[in-house]
């Protein structure tokens, strides 16, 4: 890339909103540069509860428009990426003394009917004494309700949006930080810095601040005062060994009126979360506290026959959500998950160098947020172009009738030499593009060096050359969760994970030396 390169749009932030905006913009014919100071999805967008949902509990706060918008997006995303997004049934056990059954039924009725459903069934009541979901629960819990939402591999959702943007012409630069940008002669003159300390300059007609938890910091760097603000709220999760055998998730009410999810995760584990705590400090250095761990354990133990203790936690993670600030909301859980787009464009007959800043949002509504952002930008730039993403699959998501199970069975037949577990992981992670990793191979030996069970050099090359992976962390914790089985074991597992990390980092370093231009 040449210094002083010129783009229509410079997008700052490689989380879900930044990647979604870059994708939409590239598809509308704009020249786009997306820069991210670390790796794609390295912060908030890989630390979610991994749900594509309307947000049942938001109805309690009167967020009907947000829930309706999210429910519409749920259907769109299930079609766009059936390999990384799938339906998930949720069981809400009824606990006497908390929300009454009539209120839950009313909420679920609204949830079923606020938006048109095509792919997901409606809610219904169940007798937990007869339903498999009742087996692990306390005997006193006899009734409950079932509804359906979606589960998503959040980090891969970000990567696939960035990949689609790139394939439509966008330049994607990870580990590249915006140092400063000023409006000069009607354009943004931006100084970017690579991880090695070298810097370069680019020019852009418009700039998008999609920096997530750093959105206000970037506003200050740009010398702009925003009308909106964000409140940083930490959400933490724990992972335990699998607590139940069925494939439903639980949504559990608590006496403090918060809810906690217990979700089947990576086949052998249960994901439990989340907390909501105000956060002060560096969003890049967030971690779970002992109090949060105890809170989540207690929330689950209130319902399950076998208590969950901190000793049962095999892994944990935390992230900072940049929620729209509201002085009236003392409780972080009451803060809206909706978003606001703030357009700053100099006045005049032909406004130049606009700045669009993104405040708030949730992963489910990222596509709609991006669509609204581009509608505004195309208008102010006088570059009319129609919205297009509502009916466009993400890379690997072009599966006939969005039938993942049918696709996975066909994929296994096409490559019968692949172990069944590995074939299914490839199908889930890469969809119709999984065959690109296997090109030219007719046995496991053809996939090259094996670094760990199910992790071969062919996949590493694909992740490096196609998905911007640059180190072990990128592979093990974002583009896959292959680090979890090792991290979830005791001391020996941690030693194995450390050795694997060293091997992978050494491989990436050698590849970089062999082919620096990649």
Image: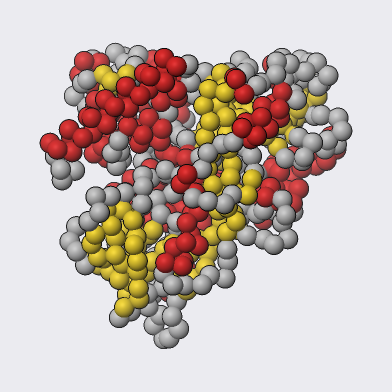
Residue at 30 percent across and 81 percent down: it is 185
Q: Is residue 122 left or right of residue 50?
A: right
Q: For residue 100, say whether it is visible.
A: yes
Quadrant of image for the N terminus: bottom left
In this view, the residue in front, 86 or 336, is 336
Color scheme of the displayed model:
secondary structure
Residue at 30 percent across and 38 percent down: it is 469
Q: Is residue 439 above or below residue 471?
A: above
Q: How many marks?
A: 0
Quadrant of image for the C terminus: top left
Residue at 58 percent across and 66 percent down: it is 228
Q: Is residue 350 above or below residue 305?
A: below
The answer to which image quadrant residue 251 occupies is top right
> Horizontal and vertical percent for residue 165?
34, 51
> Horizontal and vertical percent for residue 375?
46, 65
Q: Is residue 287 left or right of residue 307?
A: left
Q: For residue 377, say whether it is visible.
A: no
In this view, the residue in front, 91 or 412, is 91
> Horizontal and vertical percent for residue 123?
71, 34
Q: Which residue extends farthest left? A: 514
> Horizontal and vertical percent for residue 196?
24, 50
The answer to which image quadrant residue 124 occupies is top right
Q: Is residue 17 left or right of residue 149?
A: left
Q: Is residue 38 above or below residue 512?
A: below
In this view, the residue in front, 117 or 104, is 104
Q: Which residue extends farthest bottom? A: 349
């Amino acid at each position: 890339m040449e210094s002083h390169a010129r783009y229509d749009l410079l997008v700052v932030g490689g989380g879900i909103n930044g990647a979604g905006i870059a994708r939409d913009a590239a598809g509308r014919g704009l020249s786009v540069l997306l820069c991210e100071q670390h790796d794609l999805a390295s912060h908030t967008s890989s630390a979610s509860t991994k749900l594509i949902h309307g947000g049942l509990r938001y109805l309690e706060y009167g967020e009907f428009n947000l829930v309706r918008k999210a429910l519409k997006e749920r259907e769109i995303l299930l079609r766009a990426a059936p390999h990384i997004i799938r339906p998930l049934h949720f069981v809400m056990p009824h606990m006497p003394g908390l929300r009454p059954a009539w209120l839950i039924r009313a909420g679920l009725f609204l949830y079923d009917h606020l938006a048109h459903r095509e792919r997901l069934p409606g809610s219904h009541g169940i007798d937990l004494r007869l339903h498999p979901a009742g087996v692990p629960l306390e005997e006193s819990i006899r009734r409950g309700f079932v509804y359906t939402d979606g589960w998503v591999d959040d980090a891969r959702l970000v990567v696939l949006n960035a990949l689609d943007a790139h394939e439509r012409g966008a330049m994607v630069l990870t580990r590249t930080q915006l140092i400063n940008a000023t409006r000069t002669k009607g354009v943004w003159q931006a100084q970017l810095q690579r991880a090695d300390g070298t810097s370069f300059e680019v020019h852009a007609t418009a700039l998008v601040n999609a920096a997530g938890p750093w959105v206000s910091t970037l506003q200050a760097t740009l010398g702009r005062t925003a009308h909106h603000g964000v409140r940083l709220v930490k959400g933490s999760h724990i992972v335990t060994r699998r607590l139940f055998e069925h494939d439903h998730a639980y949504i559990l009410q608590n006496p403090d009126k918060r809810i906690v999810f217990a979700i089947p995760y990576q086949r052998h584990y249960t994901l439990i979360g989340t907390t909501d705590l105000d956060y002060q400090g560096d969003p890049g250095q967030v971690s779970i506290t002992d109090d949060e761990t105890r809170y989540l354990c207690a929330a689950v133990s209130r319902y399950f026959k076998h208590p969950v203790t901190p000793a049962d936690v095999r892994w944990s993670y935390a992230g900072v959500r940049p929620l729209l600030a509201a002085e009236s909301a003392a409780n972080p859980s009451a803060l809206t998950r909706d978003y606001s787009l703030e357009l700053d464009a100099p006045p005049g007959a032909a406004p130049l160098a606009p700045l669009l800043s993104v405040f708030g949002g949730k992963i489910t509504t990222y596509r709609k947020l991006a669509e609204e952002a581009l509608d505004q930008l195309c208008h102010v730039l006088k570059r009319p172009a129609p919205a297009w993403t509502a009916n466009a699959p993400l890379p690997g998501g072009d599966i006939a009738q969005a039938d993942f199970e049918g696709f996975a069975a066909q994929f296994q037949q096409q490559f019968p030499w692949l172990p069944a577990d590995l074939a299914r992981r490839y199908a889930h992670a890469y969809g119709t593009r999984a065959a690109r990793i296997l090109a030219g191979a007719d046995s496991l030996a053809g996939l090259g060096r094996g670094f760990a069970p199910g992790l071969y050099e062919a996949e590493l090359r694909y992740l490096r050359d196609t998905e911007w992976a640059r180190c072990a962390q990128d592979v093990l914790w974002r583009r896959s969760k292959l680090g979890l089985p090792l991290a979830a074991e005791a001391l020996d597992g941690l030693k194995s994970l450390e050795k694997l990390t060293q091997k992978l980092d050494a491989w990436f370093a050698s590849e970089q030396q062999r082919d620096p231009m990649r």
